Amino acid sequence: MRNYKSLSNEALPDYMPAFEGSGIAELIGIYENKKGGAEDAVVIGSDGLLVLGKESSEVLYGNIADTTIGGEPGFEKLEADRIVVTLKDGQVVEVPVRGGEGRFRDVYEFTTFLRRCIWYAQHDDE
């Protein structure tokens, strides 16, 4: 995924102060929907996501009930551009993932990653 940046070896982007004060424990990386900008970026942490935008949303992996791949009404699979996350309390959060082309859209790889994080968060005691 070209839009993903691991933050373990790179300097934090200028807009990262938005991350401070969130409940996300450890910063791992960031997915930038618009290169170099916070607009619709997704901050990836060890225990959840912080979706930046007009209204930022914090999504802890352990609080996720379901994920589906979405897009504009009537979208085709090759036009998918977001992950629709349903939390255990019924709240719905859209996570924009707009990179890639055709069957190589980043939303599919990101969804696989997210589902694995959810599984580990919910089976941590085993």
Image (cartoon, grey):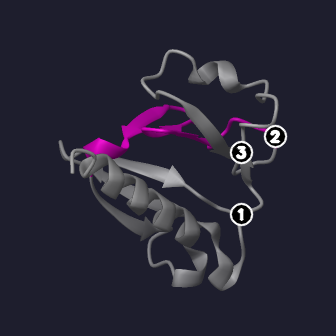
Label located before the other in sequence (1 or 2): 1
Q: Residues within 10 Å of mark 1 (few under 14, many from 20)?
A: few
Q: Nearer the viewer, residue 109 or 91?
A: 109
The N terminus appears in which quarter of the rendering?
bottom right
Question: Secondary structure under badge 3?
Answer: strand
Q: Amino acid at mark 3?
A: Ser
Compared to 89, does 67 lie above or below? below
Judged from the image, the secondary structure of the residue bearing numbered disc 1 is loop
Is residue 110 found left or right of 10 in the rendered image? left
Report how far apart the C-alphas of labels 3 and 1 lie in the structure. Answer: 11 Å
Q: Are marks 1 and 2 in contact (CB under 8 Å)?
A: no
Please name the residue that numbered disc 3 is placed on. Answer: 6
Circle nearer the viewer, 3 or 1? 3
Q: Earlier in the sequence, mark 2 or mark 3?
A: 3
In the image, the segment drawn in magenta is 36-64
Residue 71, given in percent of the width and then of the height, sits at 50, 68
Depth check: give the residue in front, 87 or 109: 109
Residue located beneath label 1 in the image:
1
Provide the residue designation for mark 2: 36
> Gap in Å between the C-alphas at discs 1 and 2?
15 Å
Q: Residue at x 78, y 30 (%)?
A: 13
Discs 1/2, front: 1
Question: Which residue corresponds to the image point at 69% horizontal and 51% vertical from the top-left?
Answer: 33
User: Reading the chain from its start, which is encountered first: label 3 or label 1?
Assistant: 1
Is 12 drawn above or below residue 62 in the view shown? above
**Could you tell me which residue is drawn at 43 percent across and 40 percent down?**
48
Position of residue 93 measured from the top left corner of the image (x, y, whole percent): 38, 47
* Cβ–Cβ under 8 Å for marks 2 and 3: no
Which SS class for mark 2? loop
Image location of residue 19, percent across then percent down: 58, 24
